[in-house]
Amino acid sequence: MIPVILSGGSGTRLWPLSRGQHPKQFLPLVSNKSMLQETVLRLQGLKNLQPPIGVCNESHRFMMAEQLREVETPPSAIILEPVGRNTAPAVAMAALAAESADEILLILPADHVISDVTSFQLAVGKAESLAEEGHLVTFGIVPTEPETGYGYIKGGEKKGEYAFEVASFVEKPDLATAKKYLESGEYFWNSGMFVFKAGCYLEELEKFNPEMYAVCKQAYKAAEVDSDFIRLDKAIFSKCPADSIDFAIMEKTSKAVVVPLDAQWNDVGSWSALWDVIDKDDEGNAISGDVVTVDTNNCFLHSSTRLLTTVGVDGLVVIETSDAVMVVSKDNVQDVKAIVDKLKNQKRVESEMHRKVYRPWGYYDLIDEGERHKTKRIVVNPGAKLSVQKHHHRAEHWIVVKGTALVTSGGKECLLTENESTYIPLGIVHCLENPGVIPLEMIEVQSGSYLGEDDIIRFDDKYGRI
């Protein structure tokens, strides 16, 4: 069985922690591991498991590769989507990447919380047996409350010992309808997780959505392979219809079955959902970071960089990061996306990027900026190298704080150690790399008439960036 890790979401309702360039699946929200890593780790112990296939946005490729490396789970491939087209095309690409049509795929979104791993693995085993028989299997979460934020699956006739035929898929209901679903015992929350043979999925996709199937097949055939990355052709893939697995196939096929899953599942789609799964103090507060409270109850309080204090409040979500603070009532957390949309309309970078920006070589943290200056703290991983580049509008001063820097400037190399510095004039071709075994930490001071990140001409890059 091949796990397929879907990592294309943006997680806008968990802003300001989750952002377009660093969404929730790459964040350690419920443990010291990211949600992507937790998704992979809960598979340990399953038999005959093959290396996973990852599917992610092209801009997230190095984060996915690095996080899988950190948990010692090298992928068989990471498929890069140049544009998002929902889950049906993403899974089609994974099915096309499988070596055989008989390979069984375990489709897992990278941003779910599942506390009862044993029950989850037992359900996967049941689903695998059904998939071997040619069924398209989905997991139906046994509901614990009349939830209005999830879609539902209605179970039909019993299918073997463990499953039910899928009678219908139902969109998110209102509260009264959700209560009826819960009382009937016939409905499950729609988990968005699946098990099926690669060939079976592609056959049903060709049958019910031939246009999507044709574009996916064409895009995969034209894809470029770069190390572990499969780069889909943007011009072709952009023509693909966007649709979920549910709409494209599961609602139409006669092969759909649902396996009940009772494993303390949560898709962590909002701050209140995250509050549900995090340990709380005696006053019902979920607290992370440097937080001091007085007369505070039932709140979600997160501080990333500084002291956060509250007095006399109830039912609030307060999230502090290095460049943003958000305060919202727990009753209104589903509307956080409206803030992100407003920031995008105002062309605010905070909608997409953190102050700390990750790159394949490490990261930089924007410390200060003004009209003609910008200061960054740069960390370069051991053995990593920035691209060979030049700038038209800025010069740079580099000061090594920790580690060793190999600097190439104007065709000349020099080795800098702690407390040493160098100057890169405007227009000079230059490069920075870390030849050591510990992270290189340095301060970069930029000065010039234009300091945007797009003022960069790359001549060579080991990570394949344009």
Image (cartoon, rainbow, N blue to C red):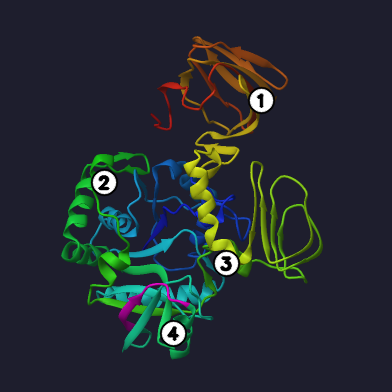
Kindly identify which residue carries mark 3.
Answer: 273
Q: Which of 58 and 102 lies nearest the eye of the viewer?
A: 58
220 relative position to 344: left or right:
left
Q: Is residue 91 in sight in this rendering?
A: yes
Kindly identify which residue carries mark 2.
Answer: 237
Q: Which of 79 and 317 lies nearest the eye of the viewer?
A: 317
Picture quarter containing residue 210? bottom left
Q: Residue type at mark 4? A: Tyr
Kindly identify which residue carries mark 4.
Answer: 181
| Distance of label 3 from label 4 (alpha carbons) | 20 Å
Q: Mark 4 or mark 2, which is nearer to you?
A: 4
Of labels 2 and 1, earlier in sequence is: 2
Q: Mark 2 or mark 1, which is nearer to you?
A: 2
Q: Mark 2 or mark 3, which is nearer to you?
A: 3
Q: Residue type at mark 3? A: Ala
| Residue range (magenta) | 164-174
Q: Mark 4 or mark 1, which is nearer to you?
A: 4
Q: Residue type at mark 1? A: Ile
Q: Dot 4: what SS?
A: helix
